[in-house]
Amino acid sequence: MTELPFLSLIIWLPVLGAVLLLFVKGDTAARWVGFGVSALVLVLFAVCFGAFETHLGDPQFVERMPWIESLGVSYHVGADGISILLAGITALMWPLALLGTWTIVSERVRAYQVFMLLMETTLMGVFFSLDLFLFFLFWEGMLIPMYFLIGIWGYENSARAALKFFLFAVFGSLLMLAAVITLAFLYHQAHDVLTFEMAALYQLSIPPEVQFWLALAFIAAFAVKVPMVPFHTWLPDAIVLAVVLVKMAAYGFIRLTLPLFPDALAELAPLMCAVAAAGIVYGALIALAQSDIRRMIAYSTISHAGFVVLGVFALNQHGIQGAVVHIVSLALSTGGLFLAAMMLVQRRNTWDMEAYGGLWHTIPVFSAFLLVFTLASVGLPGLSSFVGEFLILVGVFQQHIPIAAVAATGIILAAVYMLRMYRKVVFGPLTREENKGIRDLSFRETAVLACMTLFIIWIGVYPNPFLRTMEASVQKLLVQTHRLAETPPAGMTPETIQDMR
Amino acid sequence: MNTALPVINLYAVMPQIVLVSAATVVLIVGLFERFRKGIPYLSLLLLAVSGVVAVNQLGLGPVPFSDVSSMMVMDDFGLVATLVFIAGAVLTVLISISYAEARSIDRGEYYALLIYAVSGMSMMAASTDLFTFFLGLEVLSISLYVLIGFEQRDAGSNEGALKYFLLGAFASGFILYGMALLYGASGSTEYEAIARTLGGERSDAVNLLLLGGLGLLLVGIGFKISMVPFHAWTPDVYQGAPTPVAAFLSTGSKAAAFVVLIRLLGSVFPGLQMEWIPLISVLAVLTIAVGNVVALVQTNLKRLLAYSSIAHAGYMLLPLMADSQDGSASIVFYLIVYTAMNLGAFGVLAVLSARGAPCATLEDLAGLGSRRPLLAAVMAVVMFSLAGIPPTAGFMAKFYLFSALVHGGYVELAVIGLLFSGVSLYYYLRVVVWMYMRPAAETPAEAAGRLSYTGMTALCLSALAILAVGVFPSELLQLAERAVMTLP
Amino acid sequence: MIPVTYYLVLSAVLFLVGATGVLIRRNAIIVLMGIELMLNGANLSFVAFARQFGMVDGHIYVFLVITVAAAEVAIGLALVILLFRNRGTVNIDEVRSLRW
């Protein structure tokens, strides 16, 4: 059963789908192909998840073959507890997103499906790569589909927004590329073997001052995409993909920055925590001032992303687990909120909160779902975000009490702006003529939102399966990050790399 | 009298002989009006034949041309370079066909000169003597002077040709004088003899001659590869030249000069490293900076590509400093990828300009994404590759180049280069923005009618090659590494 | 006997005069003459060095260079004539439809 190369299938199936799409005629057929392929990926993933052994901290379903031998690059993929959760939420969200935007995207449908599938491939690739070079390849390659998605199907000023996003992202990535090359070079100097294996590079002892610069380069690449203040200015124009990016960038922090640069983190982690906390409050305050639903969601994402970064740099079990859960729940709650808002805007064609009001009476089903997503974003106990935020705050309290206090105010502010939005859109008198004849959700739309709601409640009520899945992996990560054990956990030595060749 | 005649090994120069004969055949057949339509296909065939000859010799070298004086050598380095030139010429012929017909410049001489130019480049790549290098360079340059001015009635083509001619001849003067000084220092123009002089005891006078000679050679070659501050001709000439010729000029002739530079700096002048490394590193950074920054404000596509090619020349100069096999191999790899990318970019313009008004500015590309999806896709692949975004070959080339640089200990230069390549994204993406995200103001002239099949074939081939090498670079990397292995 | 240095100085002067001519004169024909001067300066060095070393290869090179130069001039003059036909001028400053 486990003989099948599951991860490769999950990674490359969407590309096959994209190629297939080139030969498909007609919008509806293209939609079905896109949805079908992403659903198939979800099924494959479910099988994979079923076979995943939660008590192991090491990567599972490992596939490894030489690829570019003269550069020491191999095609090496595997999934540990952290990556399987993040890949899982991606696999779940993709068919839902495609289904949710079924009629919202009505121009160049085929190209839209192609780019969405290509993006799924690059995301999965990022999560499953165990080779730094491969990781970087997927990381950078993601920019192309993303650029087109923002530029062609974005909102006003989208071409500008796409360019802005791309430039920001690439400057970060290029710094990371320089750092990646330097890491490989340092390893080559120390062991006379050229390799990009993450497991091998973790073992490398780097002088602290070099670590500091390399860590900064990596952080720059990830911070742009999280997006952390002050690198967030592209986001309000390109909100479509914000949720996806948070996931990626936080994963980058966890997978690379923490275990590669333990010494530099002693200096950088408190700083990162402070910046993250500032971002939480800043994003929340700006969101408070928005009357445009899209921009409000964008700034709330900046605020939530701050929580994720905060959790990661708390550098303890609670913080990191909380961050991962929060990423998953963010995809569901903010993703759901945005999807629901898009459905509303498709009917009324405006993002202005003031243009709505009294929807509770005309479209009750929609209003109910919007309520769930709003409350989930606020962090109501029993819904998914509560678990993440709670764990993160517990983690941070153990390290920096003032920072945790500042971050907690972000939750209060979130309640204010979210509920304000909800009140304006749904409650109040039905004053506008246009809002009276509005249609409620179709069956397709209801199904999509219901599915997301189900997961939001599940994580909120019974998060244990999710926490248990990543527990062993997070522990291993922390051992690595704090260099706890005298002898580092069995990783890769230059000899094993030679043997594998 | 008892004079032993030198033993001459014609086999060692077979690719060059085949190329020159091919060009001559094309020239003669071109005299007959009734074969006019067939000339490009004949050229393709003959280029393919010379390619096969070169492939067959791979791995057999190094074989010197004669036993007395080396002059030329047959080694993998020269052969790989020759193959790259031939591939570039094949693509150029393919994109030329409809363009040349539409402008009635589809005469036999056009294709014959193209192949003569390739033979010149091949000579440069195989030369181990300054004089054969000079001859190859002149064969190449003289062919190019005529090719650039081939559109006789077009004032731009004329002026471009004159400008390239005057500056090219000026540069040749520098190269020749530099050669004279090196000859004076070592009593020979052979690379080996010069390297020997450098290795031994040298007096002040000899040192002066060597330094002066190297400096003048660098000025001359700097013109050819459009290194700052000798780059000013590039945008004008690319803009004026017939588009396929500009494509050839920006790839082939630049590649040939780089191949010579690798041979010269790598195996002849390591003894003067203290002198040329600081100089080249400053000039390389300047070249990258000027190319990328000035390209930002260009609206004419050929000028934009010209500045981009200046910037790429700057990147390729960097690994010369690393002075390692890796460094040289990374330049060879970059050259191969760069040839495919730039021919693709100019090729799209050539195919678009073949009918009706020339496609000259960014505005002309507006709406191309919906008007000509395939062509726009090719252009997008090429632009992403030039910008160095995976999964394209451009990324692999940049990665290999910068890692060679880091391994040579030049981390700062690598970071500077990478940051400027970030700047370059802006102008490459502008092309993509115009194609996909701006609707056309009015339906342009080229919208009607079919595009040339041969041109599209060439473009799709190079786009596919770019993607394939981006995903599976191993084979090509090994080829590049094997090529530099034969260098002394 | 005249020492070889004299010839070298003369050749350097020739080369510099030629290069200066290329840089400051605007008449295409005169620029061409400047280029010829540069090539001949180099030729003179070759001959002087060959004479000093007592070798013939320097002389042979000079013949080659003269041939090459002839080919270059043929092309150059053709281009100038073409330009004159199209524009009615041989002044390269007036030929600025292409921006510098």
Image (spheres, rainbow, N blue to C red):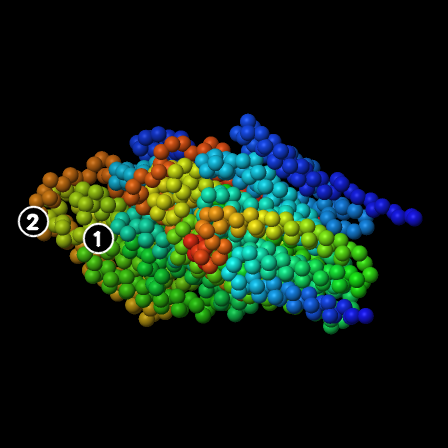
Residue visible at 17% across and 52% down in the picture: A352
Please state the horizontal and vertical placement of residue A499, each as a whole percent of the image: 64, 48
Residue B481 in the image, given as x and y percentages of width and height: 64, 49
Instruction: Looking at the picture, tell me which residue is in the foreground, B324 or B238.
Output: B238
* Residue linked to disc 2: A431
To which chain does the residue with label 2 belong?
A
* Residue A320 visible somewhere in the drawing: no
Q: Reply above or below: A316 against A131.
A: below
Q: Which residue is mark 1?
A: A293
Residue at figure coordinates x 11%, y 44% from the top left: A435
Is B55 situated left or right of A314 in this image? right
Name the outermost residue toward the bottom.
Answer: B204
Between A186 and B93, the residue placed more toward the observer is: B93
Which of the marked residues, 1 or 2, is nearer the chain's N terminus? 1
Q: Residue A398: which quarter of the image? A: bottom left
Q: Amino acid at mark 1?
A: Ile
Residue C89 lies, with reference to residue A216, above or below; the image says: above
Secondary-structure class at tag 2: loop
Crowding at dot 1, Cα within 10 Å, few <14 / some 14-19 / many 20+, comes out as: many
Q: Amino acid at mark 2?
A: Thr
Residue sitting at x 27%, y 58%: A299
Tell me, yes or no, whether dots 1 and 2 are on the same chain: yes
- The residue furthest top is B34
Give the class, few, some or many, for how many residues have Cα within 10 Å of label 2's Cα (few <14, many ≥20): few
- C23 is higher (above) or lower (below) than A239: below
Mark pair 1, 2: CA separation: 19 Å
Q: Residue at x 42, y 53 (%)?
A: C97
**Left or right: residue B386 compared with residue A227:** right
Query: Who is closer to the viewer here, B470 or A192?
Result: B470
